[in-house]
Image (cartoon, helix red, strand yellow):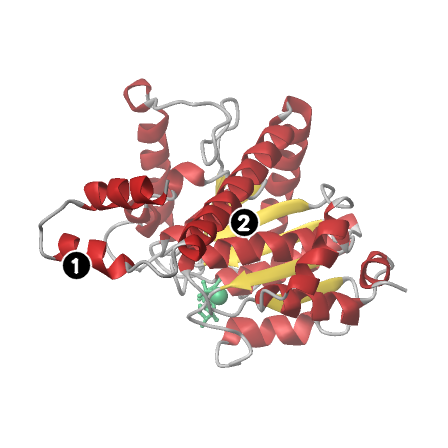
Amino acid sequence: MSVEDRILAGDRLALARLLTQIENEQPEGFEALSKLFLHTGRAHLLGITGPPGTGKSTLVNRLALALRSRTKEMVAIVAVDPSSPFTGGAILGDRIRMRDLSGDPGVFIRSMASRGALGGLARTTSAVVEALDAGGFGWILIETVGAGQAEVEIARTAHTTLVIEAPGLGDDVQAIKAGILEAADLLVVNKADLPGADKTVCALEASLELASGPHQASGHPGQLGQPDQGWQPPVLQTAALLGEGVDEVIDAILRHRAYLETTGGRTGRDRERLRAEVLALLGDGLLERFLGARKDVDLGLELEQVFARQVSPRQAVQSLLSRDR
Ligand SMILES: Nc1nc2c(ncn2[C@@H]2O[C@H](COP(=O)(O)OP(=O)(O)O)[C@@H](O)[C@H]2O)c(=O)[nH]1
Ligand SMILES: [Mg+2]
């Protein structure tokens, strides 16, 4: 039986091996993935992002359990958090996750290694998500730290994006600073058991109102990361540690999934995501081809001229491109 057939038949070991090959950028992994891609497009991708320490991992654990029992579909978790790989095991949220979810074959957890360039992380995550989609997981939860642009981009490409906040992280709401608010389909103030949660909810609601005002309308409907017109991102409260408010979040996720399906928004997001992936891979490929074709030429010369402020970066690229012709 081929690797693809084994994965399609639900073989978890084969799936885990393929994911490792993809992370290591092994050609045989990409070959298998190309065949598996024809079987993708069914999973609902749930991006969960927000500042570190807001309780994302704890909430993801709860959401996975709840989605599993309420929808009976299989759930996969992809943790893209280079700062806290849960194999390190030091974080309580991760220990809870391991304990509650182990033993259920309908739940699969994968922590992404942090190797590779920033853009590479997004590309590898796309590939991992496609493999899981082909593996029959109805829900794929992607946890990223809303700290870097790459992580935010990963969360944005999901069908439904949750932005998690918590009270007491400072005077300002972190998501507003990070500029990820406009990507949110759902906002969750976690740690509602702590004082100040109401204040955080108010701050989020106020900034949402601002963002939807006419003067702010940078509106390109359907564009990646732009909330769809007609969908008002709800602001919900949870205490993930205690399991409170989780059902309401699931309700909102299911509502958003139904909304996307009835409005055609799902297709729009799929197209945007795949378009971005193709463009990113094209960029990689062109750069590789360009650098490969001129291995004998010293890129350092152009760079040195830029360092010395003799030519601008733009001019350096123009000269590199014209010399290649
Ligand atoms: N008080 C309180 N603490 C929480 C809650 N959810 C998570 N935590 C704690 O917050 C810390 C960070 O949680 P974690 O899930 O790792 O956050 P992440 O960095 O966003 O993934 C851990 O010590 C959790 O136990 C909650 O609802 N209330
Ligand atoms: Mg985490």
Q: Secondary structure at mark 1?
A: helix
Q: Give 247 or 165, whichever is nearer the viewer.
A: 165
Instruction: For marks 1 and 2, give the CA distance.
Output: 41 Å
Quadrant housing residue 50: bottom left
Q: Percent position (x, y) of residue 20?
A: 64, 70
Q: Secondary structure at mark 2?
A: strand
Q: Give 138 or 130, whichever is nearer the viewer.
A: 130
Residue beneath label 1, please?
304
- Counting residues from the start of the chain, the first of labels 1 and 2 encountered is 2
Is 71 placed left or right of 248 in the picture?
Answer: right
Which quadrant is the C terminus positioned in?
top left
Identity of the residue drawn at 37% across and 37% down = 205
> Which residue appears farthest toward the right when viewing the image?
1
Residue 188, can we see it?
A: no
> Which residue appears farthest toward the left when viewing the image?
309
Q: Residue flagged by tag 2: what amino acid is it?
A: Gly
Identity of the residue drawn at 57% across and 41% down = 160
Which quadrant is the N terminus positioned in?
bottom right
Residue beneath label 2, please?
47
Q: Is residue 283 above or below residue 258?
A: below
Identity of the residue drawn at 64% across and 24% down = 264
Q: Is residue 65 above or below residue 280?
A: below
